[in-house]
Image (cartoon, rainbow, N blue to C red):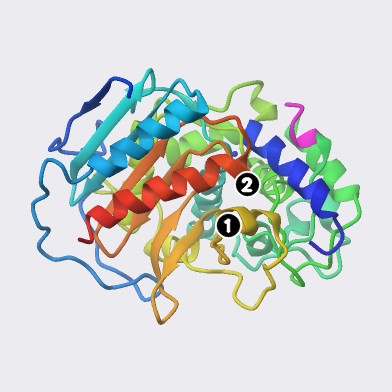
Amino acid sequence: MPATPIGVKMAMLFVVALVLGACGSSTPGEKFDPATSSSTVGSSNPPISQTTVSTPVPLPETAFDVTDAMLRERVRSAGLAGGTVVVVRGGEVVHSYSVGSVDVSTPLSVASSTKWLTAAALMTFVDDGSLTLDTGIGGWLPDFADDAPSITVRQLLNHTSGVRDRDCLWNGGPLDACVQLIARSPREFPAGSAYSYGNADFHVLGRLVEVLGRADFASVVRDRITGPLGMSSTVWPGAPGGAGPAAGVRTTADDYLKFLSMILDHGESDGRRVLSRHSIEELVQNQIGGYDTDRDFAVGITRIPRYGLGCWPDVVDADGRTVVVSGNGGKGFYPWVDFSTQSFGIIGVQDDRGAQVAVPVSQRIAVEARDVLRR
């Protein structure tokens, strides 16, 4: 990235990861109900691939054997407490497997998978007309009023704002004080001129959510996203004012599946609209076309040269429409939605070895699981 040495960025990544055969069980065939544990399938919109599987082929019992073996080896080789993989298609759990002491109900620190939730919370304010994605934030956050060019909401969501990470991101202190420090710090580049993945963007977004919602960040997200989705095990540990909007959430695979169901259903959950269809399109489509991502540390790890709003468009079709979108977390928590097979799933682990190791391994397991539904 232009103004920050690669070594510093890599060190930052390790910090994000601190916040981004064994016995197993398999329980396919359960109905995934968003009111309890998730989804009817909605129609596709233009920014999302419209290629779908209309009649799913029944899966043999051994379909996910390779996926499960990869998860077992990952847990064994890394010395993890355990791990879980769950895949949902057409409202039905087609595969669920756990190893060790981790299952779908185990609370995990999911690092940057937090960003997708924060982005969704912000989009509720776009939906209700409080602001637009291209609104300058200075009117809501006076500490940024003198920025020229103005930083917009979209630029924070897609990491093109130029704000820099600071140590206060990790100390659990008040969010407003940290954002004031970020505002006073030199910009990495003029807003909108480059892409650089980081966490400061989402701390500023978290403070914006607080101002718009007139409550602490965790409470606003609970009222607008996790509460309506029934994500009762999703929390931001620590003081209310010190919640980590970039990487601080603690949740379960079972809870996060409810969020993924809503994404697949274009903003609806159990008959209730949580986000507009347009907001889902904005979240999942590539927002950084034309930006140089070759030197970005996070792109170097994920190998995904695209970014949406708080999430990664892993796979796009020939027309640039999103086929698969994910919320990579630096500790290996890997949630995804595959629009082409009308499915979603999670690799649930908490791997503290660093994102350079944790993320690619989870990606490989997820690709294997997704490919089962394509064969």
Which quarter shows the C terminus?
A: bottom left
Is residue 147 shown left or right of residue 199?
A: right
Is tag 1's residue or tag 2's residue first in the polypeptide sequence? 1
Residue at point 15%, 42% (across, down): 62
Tell whether position 20 is magenta: no
Residue at point 28%, 57% (across, down): 371
- The amino acid at mark 2 is Leu
Dot 2 falls on a residue whose secondary structure is helix
Q: From mark 1 to mark 2, how far is it between C-alphas?
A: 8 Å
Residue 253 visible in rendering? no
Report the predominant secondary structure element of the magenta stretch.
loop
Q: Which residues are magenta?
A: 168-172
In this figure, which residue is indicated by the disc labeled 2? 212
Which quarter shows the N terminus?
A: bottom right
Q: Which quadrant holds residue 20?
A: top right
Q: Position of residue 331 (x, y in %)?
A: 55, 36
Badge number at residue 299? none
Residue at point 46%, 61% (across, down): 314
Q: Which quadrant holds residue 88?
A: top left
Is residue 236 shown left or right of residue 166?
A: left
Q: Residues within 10 Å of mark 1 (few under 14, many from 20)?
A: few
Q: Position of residue 75 (x, y in %)?
A: 43, 28
Cβ–Cβ under 8 Å for marks 1 and 2: yes
Is residue 324 shown left or right of residue 196?
A: left
- The amino acid at mark 1 is Ser
Residue 248 visible in rendering? yes
Badge number at residue 130? 1
Q: Position of residue 252 (x, y in %)?
A: 41, 29
Q: Is residue 107 above or below residue 91?
A: above
